[in-house]
Amino acid sequence: MDMNFFAIFDAIIGVLGAYLIFTSIRSYKNGEVDPMLITKEELVSCSDIKGLSQYLMPKTGIFGGFCVIFGIQGLVNDMHVIDFPRAVNIAFLIAFVIVWGVFSFFIHKAKKQYIH
């Protein structure tokens, strides 16, 4: 098994995704927001933490799910379990950047709407 830098990076993305899914479910149920997404200093200025949680946590779970998918695809490819064509790898990379950009947009929008 050839463990290279990219395989480690893909594993980290997958684990991060699993953590985001777990955190989003837990935080949504408790009406909280994880300080990994919104800092504690910003949460002090939040006018409606429950509303912020209801807005942001489902999106966090979806982003986490995509991270798990991207991590698995990259790890499977880097470990040569399945050698995906270059076009597939590029498509996954572009999709990851787009999903990350959309998630970042929602975080920015949430901060504008809920943090004053």
Image (tube, helix red, strand yellow):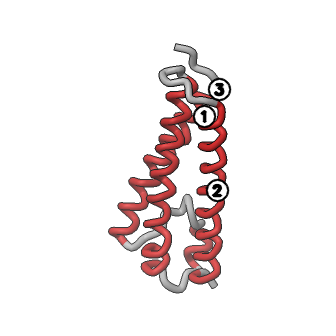
Q: Residues within 10 Å of mark 2 (few under 14, many from 20)?
A: few
Q: Residue 75: x and y, percent?
A: 53, 30
Q: Nearer the viewer, mark 2 or mark 1?
A: 2
Closer to the N terminus: mark 2 or mark 3? 3
Q: Work out whether 44 lies above or below 40.
A: below
The secondary element bearing badge 2 is classed as: helix
Q: Residues within 10 Å of mark 1 (few under 14, many from 20)?
A: some
Residue 98: numbered disc: 2
On the image, numbered disc 1 is attached to which residue?
9
Q: How far is mark 1 from mark 3, CA to CA?
A: 6 Å
Residue type for callout 3? Phe
**Mark 1 in CB contact with mark 3 (< 8 angstroms):** yes
Residue type for callout 1? Phe
Q: How far is mark 2 from mark 1, CA to CA?
A: 18 Å
In depth, the one of 65 and 28 nearer the eye is: 65
Q: Work out whether 99 lies above or below 16.
A: below
